[in-house]
Image (cartoon, rainbow, N blue to C red):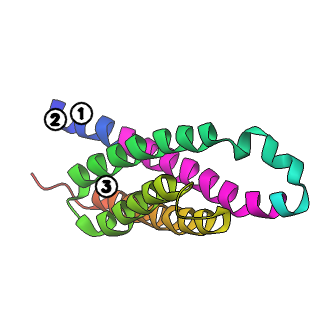
Amino acid sequence: MAAVLDRKNEDSKGVALDRAAICVSGLCLVQCLVLPLVLVLTPLMSLGFLGEELFHVVLLALIVPVSLAAFALGYRVHRNRQMFFPGLVGLVVIILAAILEGSVLGALGTALLTSLGGMLLIVGHWLNLRRRREACLRPSQI
C-alpha cells in the first residue's frame, strides 16, 4: 500500500515539474520571439534586464534541471521514451544557442535557434504529460 501512495506522490511531483518546465520554456520562447521585435521598435529596451546575459543564464539554469527532472520522473511512471527525442534535442539546441550567442550567432540567429529549442522542449514536456495521464488512467497491474 505504501508503494502505491509513494508512486502517486512521486507522480504529482513529476506533473508539477513538467508544468513548471512548460511555463519556463514558454517564458523563454515568448522572450526570444518578442525581444527582437522590441529591440527593433525601441532600442532602449536592450538596456533592460531582458537583454542581459544574466537573464539568459538564469533561464537556462532553471530550464535544464527542471526539464531533466520532469523527464526522468515521467519516464519512471510511464516507461515511454517518446518524449526524450524532442525534449532532449530541445535542451541541446537551447544550450548551443546560449554557447554560440556571442561568437557565432547574431541576435536574430540566437532568437531563432532558441525559439526552435523552446518549441521542441515544450513538445517533449507535453508528450510527457500525455504519457503520465495515460499511465494514471490505465488499470493498475498488480
Q: Relative to 77, say whether 108 is above or below.
A: below
- With 2 as the anchor, is 31 left or right in this view? right
**Pick the front one: 92 or 26:** 92
Disc number placed over residue 36 in the picture, else none: none
Identity of the residue drawn at 30% across and 63% down: 84
Residue designated by label 3: 136
Quarter of the figure that contains the N terminus: top left
Residue designated by label 2: 3
Could you tell me which secondary element the residue under label 3 belongs to? Answer: helix
Q: Which residues are magenta?
A: 13-38
Identity of the residue drawn at 38% across and 41% down: 65
Residue designated by label 1: 6
- With 80 as the anchor, is 41 left or right in this view? right
Res. 1 visible in picture:
no
Are discs 2 and 1 less than 8 Å apart at CB? Answer: yes
Circle 2 residues within 10 Å: few <14, some 14–19, many ≥20 = few
Identity of the residue drawn at 19% across and 54% down: 140
